[in-house]
Image: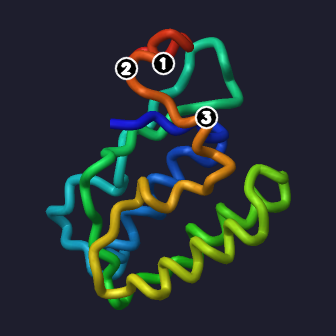
Amino acid sequence: MIYIPIARAVAESFSESLFKLAIPSHLRSPSTVTSKYCDVIHHDDVNQFSLLVMPEDVTLPIHVAADPSELIALLNQFVVDEKITQQELDDIIAALQALSGQRFNPAQLIPQSWLPYVMTREQAELAGYVV
């Protein structure tokens, strides 16, 4: 697992947006037990950040009927907040479009500018997150 710091305000929505790529809301059955791709850990003391707990080697299908606009809107706010570049967003959008109907590893779409902040379990624990 890898642990990705993300603004607390969007952490849950981000995980849900990833899950919607695999199973769009309109195709979910009543027996679907989750709406998130990965767990989210909130820090007790650091109110502005949470961690996405993302599998490193698990692939997720992108359903051909998936609408990535919710995920793109969240990522666009990261551009506005200068957390990722417009080019990084454009690269993610191009990858999502190219992968429609295929499987992909969401961890491989982490922008280069975020890689220094990605943590191991040990680093997350040292930073005070309960994992």
**What's the residue at 50%, 78% (across, down)?**
95
Mark 2 lies on residue: 131
Neighbours of disc 1 within 10 Å: few (<14), some (14-19), many (20+): few
Disc 2 and disc 1 in contact, CB within 8 angstroms:
no
Tell me the quarter of the image containing the N terminus.
top left
Pinpoint residue 127: horizontal percent, then vertical percent: 56, 14
Classify mark 3: helix, strand or loop: helix
Residue kind at label 1, given as amino acid type = Gln
Task: Classify residue 115 as left or right of residue 99.
Answer: right
Mark 1 lies on residue: 123
Q: Where is 106 relative to 122, above or below?
A: below
Tell me the quarter of the image containing the C terminus.
top left
- Way the structure is coloured: rainbow
Distance between the alpha carbons at the discs numbered 2 and 1: 10 Å
Task: Classify residue 13 as left or right of residue 113.
Answer: left
Whichever of labels 3 and 1 marks the residue nearer the N terminus, that label is 3
Classify mark 1: helix, strand or loop: helix
Mark 3 lies on residue: 117
Neighbours of disc 2 within 10 Å: few (<14), some (14-19), many (20+): some
Pinpoint residue 47: horizontal percent, then vertical percent: 68, 23
**What's the residue at 67%, 76% (across, down)?**
90
Asked where in the image residue 28 lies, by quadrant, the reply is: bottom left
Residue kind at label 2, given as amino acid type = Val
Classify mark 2: helix, strand or loop: loop
